[in-house]
């Protein structure tokens, strides 16, 4: 049975004369739900990262997996994905546009040493996903430290002032890379909030490098603050640091959430408890439920992630409170949620391996009246449904897990006319739909620089499967794994991609004893898992098109009238030769959608009417960039990044210094302004055309500096060349009676701009802004014009415009669209081919983004260990064509 099948074996628990009519309505409703899901499919994304944290100078290597939530398979929907690196000031540093082939892709970010330490984000999405909200995006916080190019390390500690609750004490500690304090150093600071300076001051560090700041406590936890410090070093150098300043409040947010959404008197209710601090992290606490007379009824306790639950049956005309002991020694008392006299409760138990047990509670006034609809669905796929007619206050039934998918499943109780009354989500994690990845012939220990060969065998239910896998190998003695929060394909694809909001340490629910973790996971879903579908099934507003390939599209008009069957030519010569033609349709639209090109490709788009008229207005389609929101996972942010990953930073610094000595890496150097007074080196000739003939005249930016226009410059100072009405003319040598003479008649010249030949009439030179010109080359004779793609003309004017300049001429647009990022290959040394005496200190020992197993499920990788002994950690993730997931972690020792 596939996930698209509707399970409409209606479970009629209690018969009714209108049951058959109700069943028909239910069938139509469920069919509409699934049709809506098919019409507006979704996508979910996971990135396998090679490491949990990084240092400036590192590469972030990643593999992209994109799945269809409906089918669970690798997605064939989008063909392009965007992966972004964002700093902790919510500024986009780099965006990669990558091709998605059968739902997968891979790439990397090179981290420049000019970056500062901080909490960065990797965000990934498709254009199609933008139509459904950014909560669907992959958005991961990663720590990036900086020891290599850092002179000042700062750690921060914030505490409330006990004697003044309106003030917060901030301790800053300034040290050098050797952990020696900068003592007796002058400090200036400012606190910025919403772009305004709200506090500022100065101080001097003590003998421990410490300085203390008292700032105002702000109960607004959503308000972001930045502490900017300037320290004057003994060398008189001023170093500036920006530090996120978290709000410190004295309260903990406590939520009481009834199972199914409603607390009803006289019925057994389960209530979830969620406690979080000002940083969005869970807080453990203990407490008791008391009634209005102070009687203690139930104990409650939350775990380290701030979640727990308890049962209570509220009685009529009674009120209840929770009396809680907070972690700071204080106590807090809060009211339980509103208690209703009438209503329904949906209670689900998911501790059995074979079945899910469901109980629906009804208040007595609801018995023997209308029908209710019970539905179990995931991503719009209906897996179970029933019509309920209550004759008693408790209806119990079980649902077999065998035909249910792994992941989030939502149960909903709807009224007779399909209004949602109660909702509850659960998690199912079958072993049968996981890929078992066995590594064969692997030793427990290896030597330094020894060849390590891993033979993989991938199976599902003991049957070999083909799949795409990514493998990362690191030394856990250097890189301490962040087991509960590292990028994990299981927790991402099955859990967090289906939940809104921040999930703290999502991998925690996949570790340790399965029974206890299942109970804690159920508390997570009880408190944070709410409605995933709007049963009114509104039509989403589709703004962003489904992007299968890169496309360049737009409209061609004369005035406001679209041009029909106009010829549109798309040309590029650098870095690769591209020339394509198409015709506009009845609406004047054109679309080049079968091209692939890399970043830094500059195009020229030319338009002509069917009759050759070039006075055409061209307008390209433009998709606006995605906004950068505040960090949705601020709880993962670490204030003292350098301190937290210091051991890794020390090792990476040794590695980078070694790479500099080998000449394969260099530090960024900030140079003072350099003014070149004079250069005796002649300007390059024909660099953009690669002709053997030198230009007759070459003019650079310096020559054109004082010119008002290109026309004035050439007409005033160049013999034999004139510009009239935007067109260039030159004297042409002609043969007469066997003799070559100078004709007094001027002939039109061809114009080439950035390698694109516009012929003798295709470009208006008066539309060029002088400041956009990098160089002008004049060729009065072209011996072999055809060999150089020159169609006509009495010589050539070759213009090279600056990189960011645009060509402006009727019917012509120059532009540089974002192309696909160039995919680099991870470097892995071959010590059996080329021995190297230098010490090998690689922090990522090996990275393979796309190992494809064959039909027998077999695949093989090999690499050499480095020179650092320790416990090496191999993380394997992957998916097969049916959407089954793989994650395997293997350890071996290198001595």
Image (spheres, rainbow, N blue to C red):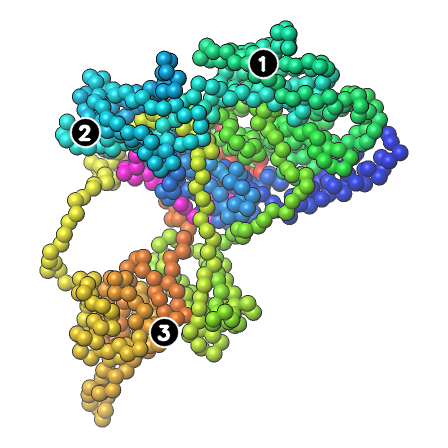
The residue depicted at 30 percent of the width and 34 percent of the height is 116
In the shown orientation, is residue 346 left or right of residue 232? right
Q: Residues within 10 Å of mark 2 (few under 14, many from 20)?
A: some
Start and end of the magenta stretch?
Answer: 95-117
Task: Give the CA separation, mark 1 to mark 3.
Answer: 80 Å
Query: Left or right: 179 with respect to 884?
Result: left
Q: Looking at the rendering, which quadrant does residue 82 occupy? A: top left
Q: Which residue is mark 3?
A: 762
Residue placed at 49% from the left, 76% from the top? 610
Q: Is residue 441 above or below residue 733?
A: above
Quadrant assignment, res 272:
top right
Q: Nearer the viewer, residue 613 or 860?
A: 613
Residue tagged 1: 322
Q: Are marks 1 and 2 in contact (CB under 8 Å)?
A: no
Furthest-right residue in view? 17
SS class, disc 2: strand
Residue 777 percent coordinates (x, y): 23, 69
What is the crowding at mark 3: few (fewer than 14 residues within 10 Å), some, or many (at least 20)? some
Q: Which residue is mark 2?
A: 232
């Amino acid at each position: 049975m596939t996930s698209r099948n509707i399970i409409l074996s209606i479970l009629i628990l209690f018969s009714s004369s209108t049951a058959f009519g109700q069943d028909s309505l239910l069938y139509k409703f469920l069919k509409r739900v699934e049709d809506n899901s098919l019409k507006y499919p979704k996508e979910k994304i996971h990135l396998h990262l090679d490491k949990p944290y990084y240092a400036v100078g590192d590469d972030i290597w990643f593999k992209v997996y994109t799945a269809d939530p409906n089918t669970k398979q690798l997605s064939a929907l989008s063909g392009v994905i965007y992966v972004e690196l964002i700093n902790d000031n919510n500024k986009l540093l780099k965006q990669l546009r990558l091709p998605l082939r059968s739902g997968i892709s891979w790439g990397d970010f090179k981290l420049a040493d000019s970056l500062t330490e901080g909490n960065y984000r990797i965000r990934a999405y498709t254009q199609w996903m933008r139509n459904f909200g950014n909560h669907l995006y992959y958005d991961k916080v990663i720590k990036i430290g900086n020891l290599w190019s850092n002179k000042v390390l700062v750690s921060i500690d914030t505490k409330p002032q006990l004697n003044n609750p309106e003030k917060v004490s901030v301790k800053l500690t300034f040290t050098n890379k050797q952990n020696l304090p900068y003592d007796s150093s002058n400090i200036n600071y400012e606190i910025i909030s919403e772009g305004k300076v709200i506090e500022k001051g100065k101080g001097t560090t003590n003998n421990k490098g410490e300085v203390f700041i008292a700032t105002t406590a702000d109960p607004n936890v959503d308000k972001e603050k930045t502490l900017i410090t300037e320290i004057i070093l003994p060398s008189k150098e001023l170093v500036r640091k920006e530090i996120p300043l978290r709000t410190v409040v004295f309260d903990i947010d406590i939520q009481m959430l009834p199972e199914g959404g409603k607390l009803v008197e006289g019925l057994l209710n389960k209530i979830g408890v969620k406690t979080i601090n000002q940083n969005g992290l869970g807080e453990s606490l203990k407490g008791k439920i008391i009634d209005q007379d102070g009687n203690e009824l139930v104990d409650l306790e939350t775990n380290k992630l701030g979640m727990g639950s308890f049962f209570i049956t509220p009685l009529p005309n009674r009120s209840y409170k929770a009396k809680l002991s907070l972690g700071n020694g204080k106590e807090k008392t809060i009211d339980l949620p509103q208690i209703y006299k009438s209503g329904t409760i949906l209670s689900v138990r998911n501790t059995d391996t074979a079945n899910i047990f469901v109980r629906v509670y009804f208040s007595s006034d609801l018995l023997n009246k209308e029908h209710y609809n019970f539905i179990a669905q995931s991503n719009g796929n209906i897996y179970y449904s029933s019509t309920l007619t209550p004759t008693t206050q408790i209806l119990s039934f079980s649902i077999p897990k065998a035909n249910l998918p792994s992941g989030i499943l939502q149960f909903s109780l709807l009224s007779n006319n399909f209004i949602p009354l109660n909702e509850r989500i659960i998690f199912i994690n079958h072993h049968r739909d996981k890929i078992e990845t066995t590594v064969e012939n692997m030793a427990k220990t290896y030597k330094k620089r020894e060849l390590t060969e891993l033979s993989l065998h991938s199976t599902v239910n003991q049957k070999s499967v083909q799949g795409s896998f990514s493998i990362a190998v690191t030394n856990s003695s250097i890189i301490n794994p962040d087991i509960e929060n590292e990028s994990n394909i299981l927790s991402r694809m099955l859990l967090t991609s289906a939940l809104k909001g921040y999930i703290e340490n999502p991998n925690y629910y996949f570790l340790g004893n399965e029974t206890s973790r299942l109970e804690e996971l159920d508390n997570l879903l009880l408190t944070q898992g709410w409605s995933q579908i709007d049963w009114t099934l509104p039509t989403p507003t589709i703004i962003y098109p489904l992007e299968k390939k890169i496309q360049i599209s737009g409209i061609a008009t004369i005035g406001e009238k679209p041009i029909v069957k106009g010829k549109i030519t798309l040309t590029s010569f650098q870095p690769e030769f591209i020339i394509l033609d198409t015709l506009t349709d009845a609406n004047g639209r054109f679309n080049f959608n079968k091209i692939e090109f890399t970043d830094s490709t500059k195009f020229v788009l030319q338009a002509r009417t069917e009759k050759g008229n070039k006075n055409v207005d061209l307008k390209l389609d433009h998709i606006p960039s995605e906004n950068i929101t505040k960090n949705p996972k601020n709880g993962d942010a670490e204030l003292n990044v350098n301190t937290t990953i210091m051991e890794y930073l020390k090792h990476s610094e040794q590695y980078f210094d070694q790479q500099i000595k080998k000449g394969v890496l260099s530090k960024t150097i900030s140079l003072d302004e350099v003014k070149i007074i004079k250069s005796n080196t002649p300007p390059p000739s024909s660099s953009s055309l690669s002709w053997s003939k030198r230009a007759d005249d070459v003019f650079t930016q310096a020559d054109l500096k004082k010119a008002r226009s290109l026309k004035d410059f050439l007409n005033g100072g160049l013999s034999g060349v004139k510009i009239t009405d935007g067109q260039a003319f030159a004297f042409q040598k002609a043969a007469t009676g066997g003799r070559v003479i100078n004709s007094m008649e001027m002939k039109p010249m061809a114009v080439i701009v950035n390698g694109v030949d516009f012929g003798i009439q295709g470009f208006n030179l008066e539309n060029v802004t002088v400041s956009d010109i990098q160089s002008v080359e004049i060729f009065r004779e072209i011996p072999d014009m055809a060999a150089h793609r020159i169609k006509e003309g009495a010589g050539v004017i070759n213009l090279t415009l600056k990189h960011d300049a645009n060509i402006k001429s009727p019917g012509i647009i120059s532009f540089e669209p974002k192309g696909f990022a160039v995919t680099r290959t991870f470097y892995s040394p071959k010590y059996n081919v080329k021995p190297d005496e230098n010490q090998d200190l690689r922090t990522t020992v090996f990275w393979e983004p796309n190992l494809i197993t064959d039909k027998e499920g077999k695949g093989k990788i090999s690499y050499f260990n480095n020179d650092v002994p320790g416990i090496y950690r191999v993380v394997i993730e992957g998916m097969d064509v049916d959407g089954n997931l793989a994650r395997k972690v293997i350890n071996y020792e290198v001595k």
